[in-house]
Image: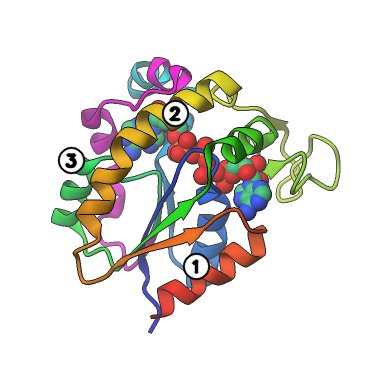
Amino acid sequence: MAATHIVLLGPPGAGKGTQAVRLAQHLGVPHLASGDLLREEVKRGTALGLKAKGYMDRGDLVPDSLIIEMFMGRLDGAKGFVLDGFPRNLVQAQLLDTAVKVERVIHVKVPKEEVIARSIARRVCESCQRPYNLISSPPKKENICDNCGGKLVQRNDDSKEVVERRYNGQYQSEINGLLNYYSPKNKILREIDGRRPIDEVFQEILRQIEN
Ligand code: AP5
């Protein structure tokens, strides 16, 4: 039987969000993306959003206390999930384990040069958050979401400088701790090559959650 409690790890722009949407639809489970939830808080101007915005715009991790407050309650009673962007460090991974049983952790590996190129060309729907790419997956109509007709925008943190900072800072400094944490755990960790086309990456993820 396929795993249904899934965590996606990877650098900024690796394709976690792209794959998480498909995977969640395929499995019929919720897709929970900490970055999307934070951007929603920023858009609504909540106290949490106001506190988080500076960290996000600079490309730094938002403090654990804010993320945990926002994220953990959403897992209550979940019969399955695809987590995208959470956990981001050891503290978050350990906390997650106190609430749910993670069945598979997929690390989508993509080199820095490629994630910078992808992120600069990324556009997202401001209504439904669906990601597009001006090079690899453009919308059918310029600047309009195929899914909901919403307007496509560029994220504040998708400049070359900020993506480099997210890659060198939050990703490089936390990923080894997460990989070490998950690798001895009943072989739930799988590493896949995220440089391939979107459909091929998806097929590989499906193989990895089946066995
Ligand atoms: P978050 O929104 O999670 O950003 P991220 O991890 O940097 O990941 P991205 O959303 O940039 O990329 P992705 O891997 O989802 O790629 P996508 O599918 O869009 O976090 C933003 C900020 O919030 C953080 O910097 C931090 O401040 C804060 N934050 C979030 N979670 C936190 C946490 N737990 N703790 C603390 N702080 C937290 O794809 C990218 C582009 O490539 C798209 O244009 C897509 O169309 C294209 N693409 C995808 N796959 C392929 C492919 N195979 N080939 C070619 N193009 C592709």
Q: Position of residue 143 (x, y in %)?
A: 79, 34
The quarter of the displayed image where residue 145 is located: top right
Mark 2 surroundings within 10 Å by alpha-carbon count, few (fewer than 14), some (14 through 19), many (20 or more): many
Q: Residue at x 38, y 61 (%)?
A: 81
Q: Specify the quadrant that holds the N terminus.
A: bottom left
The first of marks 2 and 1 along the sequence is 2
Q: Residue at x 76, y 43 (%)?
A: 149
| Nearest the eye: 150 or 35 | 35
> Between marks 2 and 1, how big is the CA–CA gap?
24 Å
The circle on residue 205 is 1
Is disc 1 placed on a helix, strand or loop? Answer: helix
Labels 1 and 3 touching (C-beta < 8 A): no
Q: Residue at x 78, y 45 (%)?
A: 138
Tell me if 80 is positioned left or right of 180 in this view: right
Circle 3: residue type: Val
For mark 2, what is the residue? 166
| Nearest the eye: 175 or 74 | 175
Q: Position of residue 44 (x, y in %)?
A: 47, 24
Circle 1: residue type: Ile
Q: Specify the quadrant that holds the C terminus.
A: bottom left
Q: Position of residue 190 (x, y in %)?
A: 38, 64
For mark 3, what is the residue? 91
**Quick check: is the Cβ at mark 1 less than 8 Å away from ligand 1?**
no
**Quick check: is the Cβ at mark 2 less than 8 Å away from ligand 1?**
yes
| Nearest the eye: 128 or 183 | 183
Q: In the rendered view, how is the structure colored? A: rainbow
Q: Residue at x 57, y 62 (%)?
A: 22
Circle 2: residue type: Arg
Q: Position of residue 141 (x, y in %)?
A: 86, 42
Name, please, the residue furthest toward the bottom: 1
- The number of discs equals 3
